[in-house]
Image (cartoon, rainbow, N blue to C red):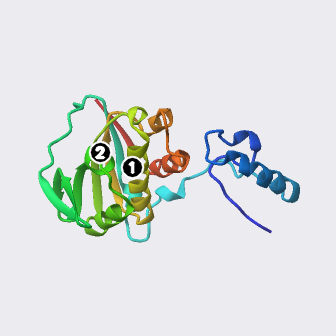
Amino acid sequence: MSIWTSRGHFTREKDISKRSLHHDRFIPAITLIHSRFEVVSVGHGPDYRRMTTDHGHVGFGAGCWVVDRSVSPATPRSRVELTVNGLPVRAVATDPGAATFTFTELCERPLGIREYLRLAEDFDRIRLVAVPDLASAERDPLMRLSNLIDVLYDRDQQLDVQAVAAPERMLEARQPPYDAARILSRLATLSPVISN
């Protein structure tokens, strides 16, 4: 017996997005899976990633994605100068265990996974504010956002986002990240909040 899982129905050739990286390379594997295994859909059920852990918190899933269309597009002024791996990084605010950054500061500057890992070591909770409509974001800032999400998700650390649109808008970007479906799956564990 062999059990494999995937997000969605990626075991059918027609369900592979043509925008996926190397989508044509998956087709032989899918054909092989169907010829040697019985493929069974387990359907929809509870998303166990959103359940409380033994420690009484939900880590990354304790965060939220707040859509507030009334927020001014102006970026809040950063007031706290931090040094992260020798690079200056400006936070809007810091509290014990928490820091607030703008999308411009963390995603539009040339920061990488090493810097995000360092921030995750220094802060248990990251708040990202002034996030634009991701449909209008360029490829590099979207990739940096994906990297930040990966780091915080893998470390099970809370992420709160204040944005002008839902995260799914990244799919409408001129060059969405290749791993957009995976990133959106991770973001689905955040509580969506719409205010206005």
Q: Position of residue 94 (x, y in %)?
A: 17, 58
On the question of residue 9 being in view, the answer is no
Kindly indicate the quadrant of the structure image that contains residue 5. Answer: bottom right
Label whose residue precedes the other's in the sequence (1 or 2): 2
The residue shown at (32%, 33%) is 164
Residue found at the very far left of the displayed protein: 79
Q: Residue at x 44, y 67 (%)?
A: 53
Left or right relative to 48: residue 139: left
Residue 53, disc: none
Regarding mark 1 in the picture, which secondary structure is present there? helix
Q: Which amino acid lies under the numbered mark 2 shown in the image of this protein?
A: Phe
**Which residue bears the numbered disc 1?**
145
Residues packed near mark 2 inside 10 Å, few (<14), some (14 to 19) or many (20 plus): many
Q: Is residue 108 visible?
A: yes
Is 108 located above or below residue 56 in the figure? above
Residue 100 x %, y %: 22, 52
Number of numbered discs on residues: 2
- Give the amino acid at mark 1: Leu
Compared with 182, 171 (above or below) is: above
Q: CA distance from mark 1 to mark 2?
A: 8 Å
Measuring from the top left, give residue 193's x and y in whole percent. Answer: 35, 40
From the viewer's perspective, is residue 158 above or below residue 92? Answer: below
Q: Residue at label 2?
A: 103
- Which residue occupies 72% across, 51% down? 26
Classify 53 as above or below 144: below
Q: Name which residue lies at 47% across and 59% down.
A: 51
The C terminus sits in image quarter: top left
Q: Are marks 1 and 2 in contact (CB under 8 Å)?
A: yes
Give the quarter of the image for residue 192.
top left
